[in-house]
Amino acid sequence: MADAEDLKALGEEVERLRIAMKEQKEYIQKQEQSWKEAEPRPVVMMSGRRLDRFRDQSTSSSDPSITEWVSDMRSQAESRKLTAPEFSIFLLDNLAGKARQEILGRGEALHQDPEGIIKILFKVFGDGDSLPILQQRFYAYKQKEEDLITCSLNMVELYDKIVQLDQSFAACRDASLKGRFAETVKDEGLRRELRRLNIETPTLEFFELRDRAVHWMGKSLKENQLLTKR
């Protein structure tokens, strides 16, 4: 008797799930259809360069990460001088699979908000880091055994993830990277040199500062080697 009741309950649960999945699929199809038929819809001209569509979290080295994809989309939008509505359409046109279903399933209001689309994609398909967590990681970052170039690129990657979540941080990108780099490097002499450069040449770009740091370390190493031989 108990087995029969359990089987009946299981059958009812399976049927509920089937109906729910069918309704969700129909809802997404309706959303997609209404979006396609919406007027007016700006026409975004596509260039000849092939753009990878974002589908899901990357599973192979050939798949673009959400950070890489968004960076590519922003660059394309800037070069084509897209308006916000056009940028939204451009993003949706370059989504597929789960990522496209995720955005379409969240309603019409989101479809017209490019920054909202990007935030949702980062939240669902990113590495799970929120803006405060990324900020904490950036400002706590310290050079360990990695060389200066790797150290600098790790910092750039962290900061660019912050910018992807909040574009207001883009305005102070160079200054923030230069300031933190001067405190991040483990060589005390280099820290003093970078602080001096930041004060005396505030217009110096971050990668120029990094290149000077690499040169300074190479020169310092040669001088130490000469002193050792004497």
Image: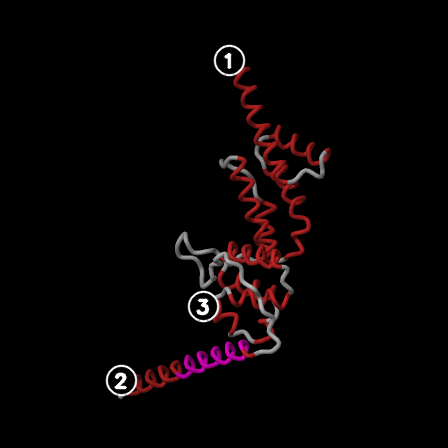
Above-or-below relation of 204 to 49: above
- The answer to which of marks 2 and 1 sits earlier in the sequence is 2
Amino acid carrying label 1: it is Lys
From the image, tell me which residue sits under label 1: 229
User: Is any part of residue 72 visible from this angle?
Assistant: yes
Task: Tell me the tag on residue 98.
Answer: 3
Is 9 left or right of 158, judged from the image as shown?
Answer: left
Alpha-carbon distance for marks 1 and 3? 63 Å
Residue 205, quarter of the rendered image: top right
Which sits in the foreground, 10 or 96? 96
Alpha-carbon distance for marks 2 and 1? 87 Å
Mark 3: give few (<14), some (14-19) or many (20+) Cα within 10 Å: some
Alpha-carbon distance for marks 3 and 2? 38 Å
Amino acid carrying label 2: it is Asp
User: Is any part of residue 127 visible from this angle?
Assistant: no
From the image, tell me which residue sits under label 2: 3
Q: Residue at x 28, y 86 (%)?
A: 2
Above-or-below relation of 87 to 228: below
Task: Tell me the tag on residue 73.
Answer: none
- The answer to which of marks 3 and 2 sits earlier in the sequence is 2
Amino acid carrying label 3: it is Lys
Percent of width and height locating residue 207 = 60, 39
